[in-house]
Image: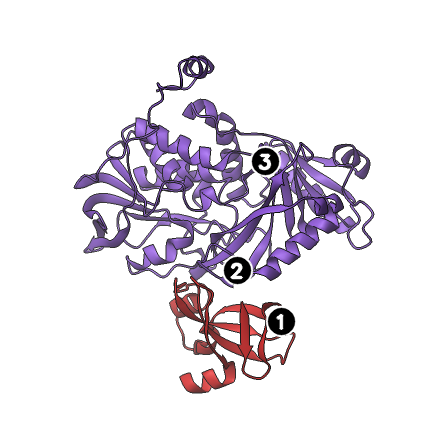
Chain colours: A red, B purple
């Protein structure tokens, strides 16, 4: 698996750290219920197929990335900077 | 058909013509008292104990592929009872006792081999930690002993004791731990369940769960609709997909864990040895292959195969621990899909749907749990009450924060276990 960082180009998997589903971009509001926090912290769609997830390019440009990846084939479908993804989803 | 030494001798002398299939291949009936989704180790043992302990024989196990084709056929076969937390401690202790009587109980050779597990330590702090763990294991009624470097050198003379980064300070020895033939465990439970009347239905994928007014009514499958009053979801890495059919989002992420085996070698490694600081462990199979594995690849995956960086890391750790392994050739590597829970412990509970039960979150430790998981899951499905050993393994512990079972004390969050 190689990830094409938007800033650094295609790089080896070892340069990146996986965080998990790209839920961190949807941080619950202060008024959120316990159920919403549970969904945010613990519950996952965990799809077998394409999924959006957060990766950190720690051994490269130190950007947070939103990677769209197929969990069945390991194919990387899209990579974007997390700040752009956050703007897009806001 | 019972197995015995006499029978093996007789069949050997008469051309092995008297053996019959170990289980039937029935078509699904329109209705059962209970259905277990998933014909892996845990599903088959659940069916076996439902029939044996609770007299429920009008039940079916539905398996998408073939029996034992998932994680029970893809693990590194290690059996142990070295947990510390209230709940986990009793559960795994019970599981090990079931393992010890398994072959007699099932009349099946599961090649249970109590060869002992040695957890190596490399610092004073780690030595203190395993002393504590050992005492916890003794107080739960199991066995543990500390081996000094001198004692270890007698058992394992070829380890690298003087590695500058990880000098070996000793090891925690769990003598009753060991390995079992993983496929045979699935087959033994399958045969035992079948003999008690359980229908084991293969090539039967569940495509929907029928729920009316909050009560489970049955399942839709690729072989038609099947009614049932009780349904247990016992599908490990695929838990999220099956639970989604009941409108549930589980606290589970599926990750890939890789394992490796070398070509067959003459006996060299009597025990299971774990090198925790290198995220690596190793044993030798009865066929002679060195079976070893490492840590997760640490990204969500359903691929049943991993990537090269983790392979390289495991090989490096193996060379660091046991330099002579460099002479062996790796024959195969593979991956299993681990149902990772946020706190690293499993979930066995009722769901919000009446009659629907969930068994998941085994992380990378499901194999040793096969007997007790089935035993306790059967109790839960038959009585509607959690068994005392799994009463803490609640689905809602993450939402409430009460009773989290964080064995490694790393926090209740995905990607930490």
* Closer to us: B245 or B194: B194
* Closer to us: B210 or B27: B27
Query: Where residue B177 is drawn, which disc sits there?
Result: none
Q: Label 1 to label 2, Cα distance in Å? A: 26 Å
Which residue has dot 1 on it?
A15
Badge nearest the viewer, 1 or 2: 1
Residue B23 position by quadrant: top left
Which residue has dot 3 on it?
B285
Query: Where residue B412 is drawn, which disc sits there?
Result: 2
Question: CB of mark 1 within 8 Å of CB of mark 2?
Answer: no
Picture coordinates of residue B197 (x, y %)?
27, 29
Tag 2's secondary structure? loop
**Residue at image point 65% right, 57% down:** B313
Q: Is residue B64 left or right of residue B272?
A: left
| Chain for disc number 2 | B
Callout 2 environment at 10 Å: few (<14), some (14 to 19), or many (20+)?
many
Callout 3 environment at 10 Å: few (<14), some (14 to 19), or many (20+)?
many
Badge nearest the viewer, 2 or 3: 3
Residues tagged by mark 1 and mark 3 found on one chain of the structure: no
Picture coordinates of residue A57 (x, y %)?
60, 75
Question: CB of mark 2 within 8 Å of CB of mark 3?
Answer: no
**Residue at image point 69% right, 52% down:** B317
| Chain for disc number 1 | A
Q: Is residue B4 left or right of residue B276?
A: left
């Amino acid at each position: 698996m190689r990830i094409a960082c938007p800033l650094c180009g295609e790089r080896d998997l070892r340069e990146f750290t996986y965080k998990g589903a790209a839920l961190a971009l949807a941080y619950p509001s202060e008024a959120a219920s316990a159920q919403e926090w549970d969904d945010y912290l613990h519950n996952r769609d965990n799809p077998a197929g394409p999924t959006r997830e957060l990766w950190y390019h720690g051994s490269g440009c130190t950007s947070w990335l939103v990677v769209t990846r197929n969990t069945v084939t390991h194919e990387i479908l899209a990579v974007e900077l997390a700040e752009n993804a956050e703007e897009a989803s806001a | 058909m019972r197995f015995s030494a006499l029978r093996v001798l007789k069949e050997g002398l008469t051309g092995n013509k008297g053996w019959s299939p170990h289980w039937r291949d029935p078509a699904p009936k329109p209705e059962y008292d209970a259905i277990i989704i998933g014909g892996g180790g845990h599903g088959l043992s659940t069916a076996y104990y439902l029939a044996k302990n609770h007299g429920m024989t009008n039940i079916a196990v539905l398996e998408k592929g073939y029996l034992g084709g998932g994680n029970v056929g893809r693990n590194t076969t290690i059996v142990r009872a070295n947990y510390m937390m209230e709940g986990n401690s009793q559960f795994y202790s019970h599981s090990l006792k079931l393992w010890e009587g398994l072959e007699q109980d099932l009349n099946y050779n599961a090649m249970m081999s109590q060869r002992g597990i040695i957890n190596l330590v490399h610092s004073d702090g780690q030595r203190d930690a395993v002393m504590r763990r050992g005492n916890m294991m003794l107080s739960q009624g199991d066995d543990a002993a500390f081996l000094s470097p001198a004692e270890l050198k007698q058992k394992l003379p070829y380890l690298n004791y003087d590695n500058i980064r990880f000098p070996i300070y000793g090891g925690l020895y769990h003598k009753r731990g060991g390995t079992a033939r993983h496929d045979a465990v699935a087959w033994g439970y399958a045969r035992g369940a079948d003999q008690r009347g359980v229908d084991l239905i293969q090539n039967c994928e569940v495509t929907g769960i029928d729920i009316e007014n909050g009560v489970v009514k049955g399942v839709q499958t690729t072989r038609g609709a099947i009614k049932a009053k009780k349904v247990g979801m016992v599908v490990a890495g695929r838990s999220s997909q099956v639970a989604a059919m009941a409108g549930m989002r589980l606290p589970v992420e599926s990750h890939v864990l890789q394992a490796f085996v070398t070509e067959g070698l003459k006996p060299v490694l009597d025990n299971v040895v774990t090198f925790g600081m290198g995220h690596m462990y190793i044993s030798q199979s009865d066929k002679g292959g060195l079976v070893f594995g490492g840590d997760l690849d640490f990204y969500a995956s359903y691929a049943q195969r991993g990537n090269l960086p983790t392979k390289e890391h495991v090989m490096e750790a193996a060379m660091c621990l046991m330099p002579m392994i460099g002479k062996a050739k790796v024959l195969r590597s593979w991956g299993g899909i681990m149902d990772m829970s946020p706190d690293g412990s499993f979930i066995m509970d009722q769901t919000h749907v009446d009659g629907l039960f969930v068994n998941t979150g085994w992380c990378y430790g499901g194999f040793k749990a096969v007997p007790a998981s089935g035993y306790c899951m059967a109790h839960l499905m038959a009585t509607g009450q959690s068994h005392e050993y799994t009463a803490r393994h609640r689905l809602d512990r993450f939402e409430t924060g009460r009773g989290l079972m964080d064995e490694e004390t790393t926090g209740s969050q995905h990607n930490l276990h």
